[in-house]
Image: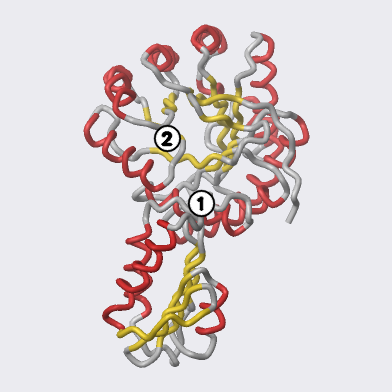
């Protein structure tokens, strides 16, 4: 793995710094109707509890713009307003407290985009320039014949120049595609061409499994090369799941140690306990825990004791019974129906003692 991250400029999204060597921030986006303040605030609270550090909401109309005021008052993480087509919504979002606006300049006229830039500059709000394969400028798409990596990069660089001509530099960039190789290539090229911080993600990635695979490959390869300053895993469904996958990618690459690393065997015919149920219960109980530590949940005595011994805490199952380990030492035998409670007692004791602080 590359130990060197590409040096980028730092940009503020509320109190969170993106780029400039800051920790890679995890983002998500609500799937609620932004005009429904209660539902949106509730989902943001769940996202924040799971570890989301920046949240984006869709702003499709003036009613959603007005809702931003009430939402902003009740959340604790920075808020990004997602705008398409209508520059007036961007102006309203900036005035109503958005910490950043996400805009695809390709679908807003230049003179209107200029108004947004001036408003953002006056109020100290950053802008994410979002370039997607599905919304490229017509002349660029015509010239390249398809939303290729080169087309995405050309669009991004054109828009950067426009922003810089207006003396605006509080920019984050994202070039996304549902095609993973194109997304990787575009971000590699853009990383060489500019020092603005990059937001990584595979758009329209699909359901949980498909998204986890595509995002782990696309985002993971780039992060492993030192490219990227903030990430979002896009999943069709509950966005809280996005946060877990994002931190899983960061943990797997040893970039950020946030949240428990749960190791569990794939199971086979030797498994003598209900490991599926046990893993689900432990994952559910550990949701929202920010401290880093390793938990091993092993289903038999073949690889179980060895794997569990490498973890901070873990169990190795047997026939309706398990061995509880802590730092490589067997603590005691536990009946299968008591394994989760016994394991969690050890986890809570470990956390109370200060182990696993990030």
| Vertical relation: 127 (above or below) 284 | above
Query: Sequence order check: which comes first, mark 2 or mark 1?
Result: 2
Label 1 Cα neighbours within 10 Å, binned few <14 / some 14-19 / many ≥20: few
- Where residue 52 appears, x then y in whole percent? 43, 42
User: What kind of element bears circle 1?
Assistant: loop
- Where residue 350 appears, x then y in whole percent? 44, 62
Residue matched to label 1 = 357
Label 2 Cα neighbours within 10 Å, binned few <14 / some 14-19 / many ≥20: many
Q: Nearer the viewer, residue 296 or 71?
A: 296
**Mark 2 and mark 1: span between their CA atoms?**
24 Å
Q: Quadrant of residue 172?
A: top right
Q: Which mark is residue 49?
A: none
Q: Residue at x 25, y 27 (%)?
A: 35
User: What kind of element bears circle 2?
Assistant: strand
| Vertical relation: 318 (above or below) 265 | below
Q: Quadrant of residue 254?
A: bottom right
Q: How is the image coloured?
A: secondary structure
Q: Residue at x 43, y 24 (%)?
A: 83
Q: Residue at x 59, y 34 (%)?
A: 174
Q: Nearer the viewer, residue 159 or 27?
A: 27
* Figure quadrant of the N terminus: bottom right
Q: Which mark is residue 55?
A: 2
């Amino acid at each position: 793995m590359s130990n060197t991250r590409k040096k980028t400029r730092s940009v503020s999204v509320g109190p969170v710094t993106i780029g400039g060597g800051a920790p890679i921030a995890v983002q998500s986006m609500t799937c609620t109707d932004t005009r429904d303040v209660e539902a949106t605030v509730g989902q943001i609270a769940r996202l924040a509890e799971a570890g989301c550090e920046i949240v984006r909401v869709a702003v499709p109309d003036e009613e959603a713009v007005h809702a931003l005021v009430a939402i902003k008052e009740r959340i604790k993480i920075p808020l990004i307003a997602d705008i398409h087509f209508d520059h007036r919504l961007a102006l309203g979002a900036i005035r109503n407290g958005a910490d950043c606006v996400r805009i695809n300049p390709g679908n807003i006229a230049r003179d209107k985009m200029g108004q947004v830039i001036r408003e953002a500059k006056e109020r100290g709000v950053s802008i994410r320039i979002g370039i997607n394969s599905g919304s490229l400028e017509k002349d660029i798409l015509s010239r390249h014949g398809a939303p290729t990596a080169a087309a995405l990069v050309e669009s991004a660089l054109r828009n950067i120049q426009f922003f810089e001509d207006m003396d605006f530099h509080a920019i984050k960039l994202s070039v996304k595609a549902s095609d993973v190789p194109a997304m990787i290539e575009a971000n590699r090229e853009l990383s060489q061409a500019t020092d603005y911080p990059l937001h990584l993600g595979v758009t329209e990635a699909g359901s949980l499994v498909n998204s986890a695979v595509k995002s782990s490959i696309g985002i993971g390869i780039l992060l492993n090369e030192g490219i990227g300053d903030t990430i979002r895993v896009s999943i069709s469904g509950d966005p809280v799941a996005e946060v877990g996958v994002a931190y899983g990618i960061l943990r797997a690459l040893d970039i950020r140690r946030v949240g428990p690393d749960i190791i569990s065997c794939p199971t086979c015919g030797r498994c003598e306990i209900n490991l599926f149920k046990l893993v689900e219960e432990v994952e559910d109980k550990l949701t929202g825990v920010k401290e880093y530590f390793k938990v091993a949940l092993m289903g038999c005595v073949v690889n179980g004791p060895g794997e569990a011994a490498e973890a901070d805490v873990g169990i190795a199952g047997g026939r309706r019974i398990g061995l509880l380990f802590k730092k490589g030492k067997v603590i005691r035998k536990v009946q299968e129906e008591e394994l989760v409670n016994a394991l969690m007692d050890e986890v809570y004791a470990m956390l109370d003692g200060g182990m696993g602080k990030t």
